[in-house]
């Protein structure tokens, strides 16, 4: 499995090939830590990554959002729940 902080370039595979060898693609992402870009035609459409990479992304999002909140509170900038709901499209 890939170590933290050793990001590798993503491999690219067509949607057709990913579908035909889905178990192998999952194994590459889940067990070998590869990040795999799925292309439909010539356009990148999705990314398959291992759960550990996904969890790190979620953690980074949480930290980023927390830092934005802290900054907002320090600057006395508040928004209402209605504004948050509208921004998030909820």
Image (cartoon, rainbow, N blue to C red):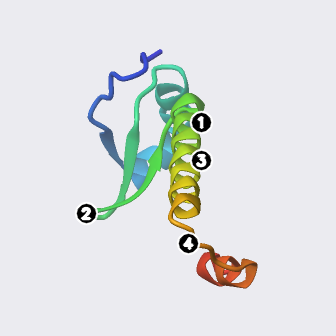
Residue for point 66% across, 76% down: 84
Q: Residues within 10 Å of mark 1 (few under 14, many from 20)?
A: few
Sooner in the amino-acid sequence: mark 3 or mark 1: 1
Residue 83 horizontal/vertical position (percent) = 65, 83
Residue 78 horizontal/vertical position (percent) = 62, 73
Front label number (4 vs 2): 4
Residue denoted by label 1 = 55
Sooner in the amino-acid sequence: mark 3 or mark 2: 2
Sooner in the amino-acid sequence: mark 4 or mark 2: 2
For residue 42, the mark is: 2
Are the residues tagged 3 and 4 within 8 Å (C-beta)?
no
Residue denoted by label 4 = 77
Image quarter of residue 30: top right
* Dot 2: element: loop
Residue denoted by label 3 = 62
Front label number (3 vs 1): 3
Q: Nearer the viewer, residue 22 or 72?
A: 72
Q: Residues within 10 Å of mark 3 (few under 14, many from 20)?
A: few
Q: In the rendered view, would you say 82 is above or below 24?
A: below
Sooner in the amino-acid sequence: mark 3 or mark 4: 3
Q: Residues within 10 Å of mark 2 (few under 14, many from 20)?
A: few
Q: In the rendered view, would you say 16 is above or below 84?
A: above
Are the residues tagged 2 and 1 within 8 Å (C-beta)?
no
* Dot 3: element: helix
Q: How many badges with numbers are in the image?
A: 4
Front label number (4 vs 1): 4
Report the Cα–Cα distance between label 3 and label 4.
Answer: 19 Å
Report the Cα–Cα distance between label 3 and label 2.
Answer: 33 Å
Residue 11 horizontal/vertical position (percent) = 31, 37
């Amino acid at each position: 499995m890939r170590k933290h902080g050793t990001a590798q370039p993503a491999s690219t595979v067509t949607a057709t090939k990913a579908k035909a060898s889905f178990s192998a693609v999952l194994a590459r992402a889940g067990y070998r830590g590869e990040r795999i870009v799925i292309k439909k035609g010539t356009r990148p459409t999705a990314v398959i990554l291992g759960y550990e990479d996904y969890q790190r992304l979620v953690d980074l999002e949480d930290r980023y959002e927390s830092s934005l909140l802290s900054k907002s509170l320090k600057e006395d900038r508040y928004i209402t729940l209605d504004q948050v709901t509208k921004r998030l499209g909820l």
